[in-house]
């Protein structure tokens, strides 16, 4: 068996150890997939009956459109599928409502599992043993987390079925005719699936292409014979369903048509531009798909064709975007460290709301409102996926790791494979990591008291009285005295602390990260990991112990120097309490992040005045949070605790920080990138 990390031979006890670890990881991944599946089932089945499977209910419920005599499309907001879809769904309308809901939910789960298994087996060959063992549970987990699957479960949609039919036709069944039949049925359910016929034709599977076209025509003809009026309405009057949507300009419509409408284009100009762009995307995307299919990457070719279908369809709703997720199989980048960029971007775009990825700024709205469409267009037309004939496909440029530094304890590091990397990480991924992390921080702050200010106010104020009592017992309750002394006797100091509190919280940490990213890549990774762990621990604190800051404690007489007087007679008082949850005071990340900056600056700086700034910044911050009434003294203690734990977790998981300073680098004669490669092994550096 080949060593998964180095490719060398492994024999004897080492081989058994590697096999045991891989088996344990595989079991863990399957457990994660099972937990996500159960979570999705519980989320659907625990929803009140009138709020779950809403699309399915409007189709085949007791008063659904399939029960009503007359046209399926009399109410276009209720049914937008093809006539063949209506013909297939009609028999289900006779089933009992509750039994149908359970059956539909568990049936959808089975489809997702089969889809993940087929996709895992369809990976381009050859694949490593590790990939073959882990691919199926990872694929199922990603599907369960993706917004298209979650929406399909919640709404009761059929959008998973066309994707599965295409994958079965391309990878599971034997014989081109059977393959074409499955793809043709998928096209009868979702017309843009017909784009797979050219892919089959130009890759030499012409019988499958013809069979798919004949099957599509037969299914559509059957529906036309059974429902001629509805078929005319769908295919002719509404231009293959393009006119059935009540609001094609909605953000949920991630197609070129929807994007152009959101840009304010209308009428013949918009239609002409949509047609031209669709033809260009289809021509370029299908050409790329054919090239990768001939290269032996048929799953990637299927994903690219699906992305083309997403872009050129008049309406592509969120539950129909599953094709984009399949594009994660493409290999991009020369370096091993770059291989994660494209999959991470796709997974984030398909699993998180766009507002979590990009800030709510006006100039970013065109990107934020079309994130998934941009990902689909990139996969179809732009991303330079590597060919299997490229020597970099299986052997990317290796990552430059630091020489391990001996630790104080034999059990450190806990994760040996998480070694110190000397090269600079990908900037796009780092910015996304910061943005997603901050969005999670905001969401947890909002949810710390159940998502409502009035609902969590009593608990937060009770915790505030607890903290105040503990400080009185310890004789450290100086917040009131400092707050009033600054307000009454030092106006200039009050203004300074207000400015410091509102300005330096984000500016200094981001500046430190930016300097380290440019000048000290290896130390950037160390510092970023510690900050991430500290923030994660703080989020747990916000969730477990909502706490009112001194300025929001009625009856204690604190003055809110930053936000102004609060009207405590109202349930949701003050401007800030209307916008975000202010009861996330323990631990104080204002002080925690400033202390992190101080530690990083003191440890890494070589000039005394920079070390002095590293000491002064947390001192000024703790003075500001107390003087402005925004935190208790014990909040700062909590902030220091999570920062200390953050550095400790980084040390325990990764090992000691690699010392990357040489004599020449200390004099400033050697660039930081060169100095980063010179690792001095100096015993037990703690970092």
Image: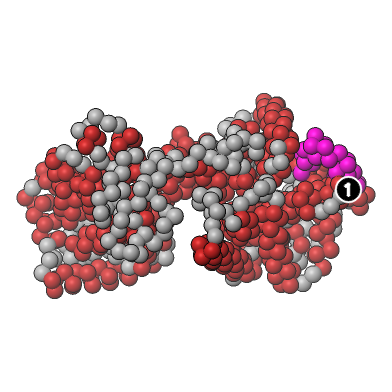
Q: Around disc 1, counting alpha carbons within 10 Å, would you say few (fewer than 14), some (14 to 19), or many (20 or more)?
A: some
- Near-viewer residue (625 or 291): 291
Residue 27 locus on image (x, y percent): 57, 67
**Residue 464 at x, y percent in the picture:** 25, 68
Q: Does dot 1 land on a helix, a strand or a loop?
A: helix
- Asked if one can make out residue 625 in the rendered structure from this viewpoint, the answer is yes
Q: Which quarter of the image is occupied by the N terminus?
A: bottom right
Q: Main secondary structure of the magenta part?
A: helix
Instruction: Write the residue at 42% across / 42% down.
Output: 400
Answer left or right for 388 relative to 205.
Answer: left
The extreme right residue here reads: 225
Drawn side of residue 206 relative to residue 362, left or right: right
Residue 432: image location, x then y, percent: 45, 44
Q: Is residue 150 visible?
A: no
Q: Splitting the image into 4 quarters, where does residue 638 fall?
A: bottom left
Check disc 1 and report the residue beneath it. 177
Residue 69: where, in percent of width, then height?
85, 58
Q: Is residue 568 left or right of residue 371?
A: left
User: Magenta includes 602?
Assistant: no
């Amino acid at each position: 068996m080949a060593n998964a990390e180095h490719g060398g031979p492994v024999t004897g006890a080492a081989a058994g150890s590697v096999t045991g670890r891989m088996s344990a990881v595989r079991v863990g991944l399957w457990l994660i997939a099972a937990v996500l599946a159960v979570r999705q089932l519980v989320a659907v089945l625990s929803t009140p009956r009138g709020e779950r499977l809403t699309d399915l209910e409007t189709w085949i419920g007791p008063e659904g459109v399939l029960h009503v005599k007359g046209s399926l499309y009399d109410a276009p907001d209720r049914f937008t599928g093809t006539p063949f879809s209506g013909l297939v769904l009609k028999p289900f309308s006779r089933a009992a409502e509750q039994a149908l809901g359970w059956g539909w939910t568990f049936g959808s789960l089975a489809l997702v599992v089969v889809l993940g298994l087929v996709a895992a087996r369809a990976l381009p060959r050859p694949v490593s043993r590790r990939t073959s063992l882990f691919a199926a549970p990872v694929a199922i987990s990603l599907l369960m987390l993706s917004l298209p699957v979650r929406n399909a479960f919640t709404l009761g949609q059929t959008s998973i079925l066309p994707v599965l039919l295409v994958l079965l036709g391309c990878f599971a069944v034997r014989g081109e005719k059977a393959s074409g039949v499955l793809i043709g049925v998928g096209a009868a359910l979702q017309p843009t699936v017909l784009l797979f016929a050219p892919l089959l034709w130009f890759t030499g599977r012409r019988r499958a292409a013809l069979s798919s076209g004949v099957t599509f025509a037969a299914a559509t003809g059957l529906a036309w014979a059974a429902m001629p009026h509805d078929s005319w309405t769908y295919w002719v009057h509404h231009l293959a369903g393009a006119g059935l949507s009540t609001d094609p300009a909605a953000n949920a419509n991630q197609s070129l048509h929807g994007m152009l409408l959101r840009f304010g284009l209308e009428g013949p100009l918009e239609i002409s531009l949509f047609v031209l762009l669709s033809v260009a995307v289809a021509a370029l995307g299908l050409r790329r798909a054919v090239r990768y299919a001939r290269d032996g990457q048929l799953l990637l070719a299927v994903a690219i064709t699906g992305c083309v279908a997403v872009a050129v369809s008049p309406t592509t709703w969120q539950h129909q975007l599953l094709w984009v997720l399949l594009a994660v199989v493409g290999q991009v980048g020369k370096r091993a460290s770059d291989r994660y960029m494209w999959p991470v971007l796709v997974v984030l775009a398909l699993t998180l709301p766009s507002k979590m990825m990009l800030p709510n700024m006006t100039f970013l709205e065109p990107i934020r409102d079309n994130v998934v469409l941009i990902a689909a267009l990139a996969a179809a037309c732009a991303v330079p996926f590597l060919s299997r004939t490229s020597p970099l496909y299986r052997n990317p440029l290796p990552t430059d790791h630091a020489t391990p530094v001996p630790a104080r304890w034999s059990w450190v590091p806990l994760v040996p494979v998480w070694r110190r990397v000397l090269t600079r990480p990908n900037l796009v991924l780092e910015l996304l990591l910061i943005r997603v992390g901050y969005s999670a921080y905001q969401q947890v702050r909002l949810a710390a008291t159940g998502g409502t200010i009035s609902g969590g106010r009593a608990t937060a104020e009770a915790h505030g009285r607890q903290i105040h009592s503990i400080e009185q017992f310890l004789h450290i309750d100086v917040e009131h005295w400092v707050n009033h002394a600054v307000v009454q006797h030092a106006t200039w100091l009050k203004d300074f602390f207000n400015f410091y509190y509102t300005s330096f919280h984000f500016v200094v940490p981001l500046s430190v990260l930016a300097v380290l990213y440019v000048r000290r890549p290896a130390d950037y990774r160390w510092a970023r990991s510690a900050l991430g762990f500290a923030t994660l621990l703080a989020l747990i604190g916000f969730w477990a112990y909502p706490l009112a800051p001194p300025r929001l404690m009625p009856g204690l007489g604190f003055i809110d120097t930053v936000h102004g007087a609060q009207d405590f007679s109202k349930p949701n008082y003050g401007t800030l309490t209307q916008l975000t949850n202010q009861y996330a005071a323990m631990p104080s990340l204002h002080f925690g992040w400033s202390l992190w900056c101080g530690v990083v600056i003191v440890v890494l700086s070589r000039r005394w005045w920079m070390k002095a700034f590293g000491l002064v910044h947390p001192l000024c911050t703790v003075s500001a949070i107390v003087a402005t009434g925004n935190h208790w003294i014990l909040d700062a203690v909590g902030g220091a605790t999570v920062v200390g734990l953050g550095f400790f977790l980084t040390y325990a998981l990764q090992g000691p920080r690699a010392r990357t300073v040489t004599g020449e680098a200390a004099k400033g004669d050697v660039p930081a990138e060169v100095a980063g490669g010179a690792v001095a092994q100096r015993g037990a550096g703690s970092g």
